[in-house]
Amino acid sequence: MTTAKEAATDAARVLAEKTGVERHDIALVMGSGWLPAVDALGEATAELSTTDLPGFAPPAVEGHAGKIRSVRAGEKSLLVFLGRTHFYEGLGVRAVAHGVRTAAAAGCSTVVLTNGCGSLQEAWAPGTPVLISDHINLTATSPIEGAHFVDLTDLYSSRLRALCREVDPSLDEGVYVQFPGPHYETPAEIGMVGAIGGHLVGMSTTLEAIAAREAGMEVLGISLVTNLAAGITGEPLNHEEVLETGKAAASRMGELLGAIVPRI
């Protein structure tokens, strides 16, 4: 049976053939609401469907384009995933981690993981970007296969977070908590998140971050607050709100990424 690393190597080989770029430097995974910010990163030199590469599934979530774009930003080649595979799609944890593993196999030493999330902090209004300082993985699984023990002490790079604050000193940071989804959390679950030290909630990112660290990549996580978490305002939650908030914050997110990425 093909290992996860072998599958990623196969995908990276096809990626190089189709993009004409032998080696990429930085990968970005764009979460819900982040797509409008992509154009600020630089000139796209190639774009393909994720399904053009082995091991990738078609997109299953509105707001995720199912495309991979090769972008030239100064001296760096960026590999931008316009969407991701989520754990709740039922394809297994290997499919969730395949993108970041492919990026590592393609030469990327750094990955920027973005997402749309709910916030427990009322001061973080929808449209606020927050750096991920740490995470709590409530999916009850890991992307690591076999007895490979990986240290996660500084999973979300303190160096990269400091760099982000140099670009934008107003950036706050917090602990991101991943639930399996696809249903939103209950108010009681949000109460639990607060009790265990979480500030942000969502349905992605942690499994990709672990796989990226296993592959030796430096990880930067940025959440875009799209709503206050369940029970805080008393209002119901919906995915359309997530996408609308992303559109409204697109210029700020684009400027933020456009300023940070060249400095990584």
Image (spheres, helix red, strand yellow):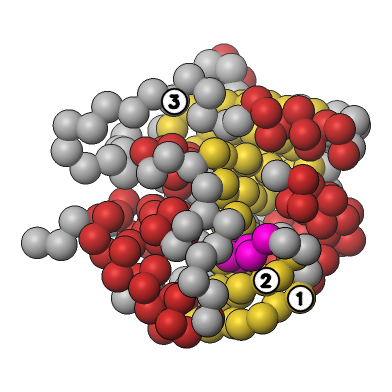
Residue most toward the left? 1
Which residue is labeled 3 in the image? 152
Region in magenta = 76-80
Identify the residue at image location x=45%, y=62%: 106
* Chain-order first, disc 1 or disc 2: 1
Residue 7, placed above or below residue 132: below
Residue 164 can be seen, yes or no: yes
Give the Cα separation between the discs numbered 1 and 3: 34 Å
Residue 115 shows up from this direction: no
Q: Are marks 1 and 2 in contact (CB under 8 Å)?
A: yes
Q: Quadrant of residue 185?
A: top right
Inspect the image, locate mark 1, and give the three-letter code of the amino acid beneath it: Glu
Q: For numbered disc 1, what is the local secondary structure?
A: strand
At label 1, counting other C-alpha atoms closer than 10 Å, the crowd grade (few under 14, some 14-19, many 20 or more) is: some
Q: Nearer the viewer, mark 1 or mark 3?
A: 1
Task: Give, as a three-letter code, the residue at label 2.
Answer: Val
**Residue at mark 2:** 71
Q: Quadrant of the C terminus?
A: top right
Q: Is residue 30 above or below residue 211?
A: below
For the N terminus, the quadrant is bottom left
Residue pointed to by mark 1: 43
Assess whether residue 107 is covered by the magenta stretch. Answer: no
Taking the image as shown, residue 132 lies to the left or right of residue 256, namely: left
Mark 3, Cα crowd under 10 Å, few <14 / some 14-19 / many 20+, is: few
Q: Is residue 238 left or right of residue 180?
A: right
Q: Nearer the viewer, residue 244 or 204?
A: 204
Which amino acid, by three-letter code, is at mark 3?
Leu
Residue visible at 33% across and 62% down in the picture? 8
Q: Earlier in the sequence, mark 1 or mark 3?
A: 1
Say above or below: 74 vs 200. Answer: below
Local secondary structure at mark 3: loop
